[in-house]
Amino acid sequence: MTKYIIHGGKPLFGEVEISGAKNAAVAIIPAALMVNGVCRIENIPQISDVTMSLKILEQLGARIRSVNRHTVEIDSRHIYSTKTSYELARKIRASYYLIGALLGRFGDAEVALPGGCNFGGARPIDQHIKGFTALGARVTVEGGFIHASAEGRKLKGANIYLDVVSVGATMNIMMAAAMAQGNTVIENAAKEPHIVDLANFLNSMGANIRGAGTDTIKIQGVDHLTGGTYAIIPDQIEAGTYMAAVAATGGQVLVKNIIPKHMDCITAKLQECGVEVDEHEDTLLVRRCGPLHKANIKTLPYPGFPTDMQPQMTTVLALAEGTSLVTEGVWSSRYRYVDELKRMGARIQVDDKTAVVEGVDHLTGAPIQASDLRAGAALVIAALAAHGESEISQVQYIERGYEDIVNKLRSLGADIRAVDVPDEDLDLTAHIS
């Protein structure tokens, strides 16, 4: 097992290159199963969720070839199974995208119930099942697996209205419908950048999807998808995390390889807090010299403030002058990291979906533990800004979504290192999934 040891109080300076988007990659890789040919996918982030996704594809019969550190070729012409390994699939939340991909191409899928981050609250997939059922699939859950099958191994297009705006359901239904007979319309669809990226990937392979990025997506089913090359978009949340780190610690960092439009919702809140952000073609220059100001935040579906940036931004507000309000409008039970921030001296009170954040002069280093991916990122930011030394355990959550975070932060002047520790030194009661 690994811990991060961080000596905080150092401002960050330099340049950081943003990797490919985790939330796009974990959908596009399963979508490669739909292609009766070879996909070359570029700008893939080197993170554990991607590694696990590629292992699952290999287990199903895909042939994977690493071209370089960030490019793979996936050959799905010889898939021999539509049932995933229970042990592999349960390790990542995004395993549910395998249902839409396998169901879309083969009319059958048997996928273990997803794992991933331990939020301590329900993250239901009822909207996914609603969509698959509308397309003509029979869906059952038994023995830890979701089994979906279409009569005659072929789905049929349908009009689908999502009861809630769901990123995962939008992407999963879009994959399933791409090769269905006839036309499908998804209404009340989510609009996140990675949904557009998945649609662009599928279209580049021969699909006919229009309207991704709006609340109505129209899909004309095609008989087959063929191979091609596609590059994944930069990671909006990774970029936002480094921006928040500069806000918390001070300094000046050039954030490279980003799409500025995707960053607008994050940039606006940081500027409200007194952080300077200069936008260029594919970079943002972020600097913070003076004190941080209070702000109110409510997470919302895109283009609103992203839930995946809520813990990082709450950490910034913990160091701001005055009292801020943070309202979680997407996921319940996402404040588990707050107790860890309190160990460092933060003053935060949580009532259901709202956190009242009373800014403090500084945080103090402490032993702390990540409970999920974005909570882990928030704790790294807190430790970078804190006085003294912090030890962060359960960092496997962080490495699900951040490529080479230790070396990237070290290049900016952070005093951080990863150390291997015996398993018995860690809290073995922590939930790992």
Image (cartoon, rainbow, N blue to C red):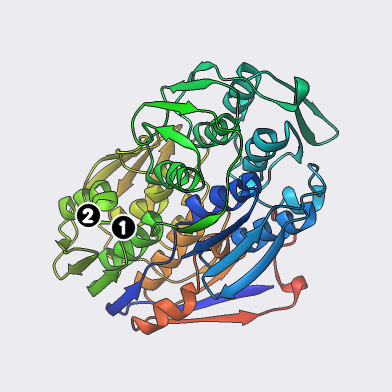
The image quadrant that residue 330 belongs to is top left
Residue indicated by mark 1? 316
Residue 270's label in the rendered image is: 2
Please give the name of the residue rendered at 19% of the width and 54% of the height, measured from the top-left corner.
273
Please give the name of the residue rendered at 51% of the width and 60% of the height, measured from the top-left corner.
376
Q: Is residue 365 above or below residue 430?
A: below
What's the amino acid at mark 2?
Answer: Leu
What's the amino acid at mark 1?
Answer: Val
Q: Nearer the N terminus, badge 2 or badge 1? A: 2
Q: Position of residue 255 (x, y in %)?
A: 28, 69
Q: Is residue 316 above or below residue 176?
A: below
Crowding at dot 2, Cα within 10 Å, few <14 / some 14-19 / many 20+, comes out as many
In the image, taking residue 416 as reference, residue 293 lies left or right, namely left
Residue 149's label in the rendered image is: none
Q: Position of residue 141 (x, y in %)?
A: 78, 27
Q: Residue furthest right?
A: 143
Question: Are the two marked residues, 2 and 1, in contact with CB atoms closer than 8 angstroms?
Answer: yes
Q: Quadrant of the N terminus?
A: bottom right
